[in-house]
């Protein structure tokens, strides 16, 4: 699983890719490269979030196999 720091880095790079694409200042080739990189960053973020979800689910699983639901406090 990616570390939180690498998740934050991937998310930041994804945001930068979106900004570049939205600017409309890239050539078609540049836009394709930026888009491709953004897809990779989005996949990395998605994978990290899925891994975290599985860990949380494992932590909340009861002995009978059911999941215990807990509300997260807004901090």
Image (cartoon, rainbow, N blue to C red):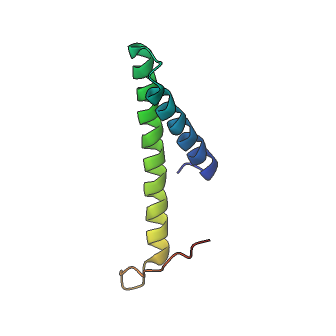
Q: Position of residue 46 (x, y in %)?
A: 43, 49
Q: Please tell me which residue lies in front, 60 or 15.
A: 15
Residue appearing at x 47%, y 80% in the figure? 70
Q: Position of residue 4 (x, y in %)?
A: 60, 52
Q: Please tell me which residue lies in front, 23 or 6.
A: 23
Residue appearing at x 48%, y 68% in the figure? 56
Q: What number of labels is visible?
A: 0
Q: Is residue 5 above or below residue 40?
A: below
Q: Is residue 4 left or right of residue 34?
A: right
Quarter of the image for the C terminus: give it.
Answer: bottom right
Q: Position of residue 54 (x, y in %)?
A: 44, 63
Q: Is residue 10 left or right of residue 69?
A: right
| Quarter of the image where one finds residue 62 | bottom left
Residue appearing at x 50%, y 32% in the figure? 19
Q: Position of residue 30 (x, y in %)?
A: 45, 17
| Quarter of the image where one finds residue 12 | top right
Residue appearing at x 41%, y 35% in the figure? 39
Q: Is residue 47 above or below residue 31?
A: below
């Amino acid at each position: 699983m990616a570390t939180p720091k690498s998740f934050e880095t991937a998310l930041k790079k994804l945001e930068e890719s979106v900004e570049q694409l939205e600017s409309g200042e890239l050539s078609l080739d540049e836009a394709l490269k930026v888009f491709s990189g953004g897809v990779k960053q989005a996949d990395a973020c998605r994978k990290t979030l899925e891994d975290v979800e599985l860990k949380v689910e494992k932590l909340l699983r009861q002995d009978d196999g059911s999941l215990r639901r807990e509300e997260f406090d807004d901090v």
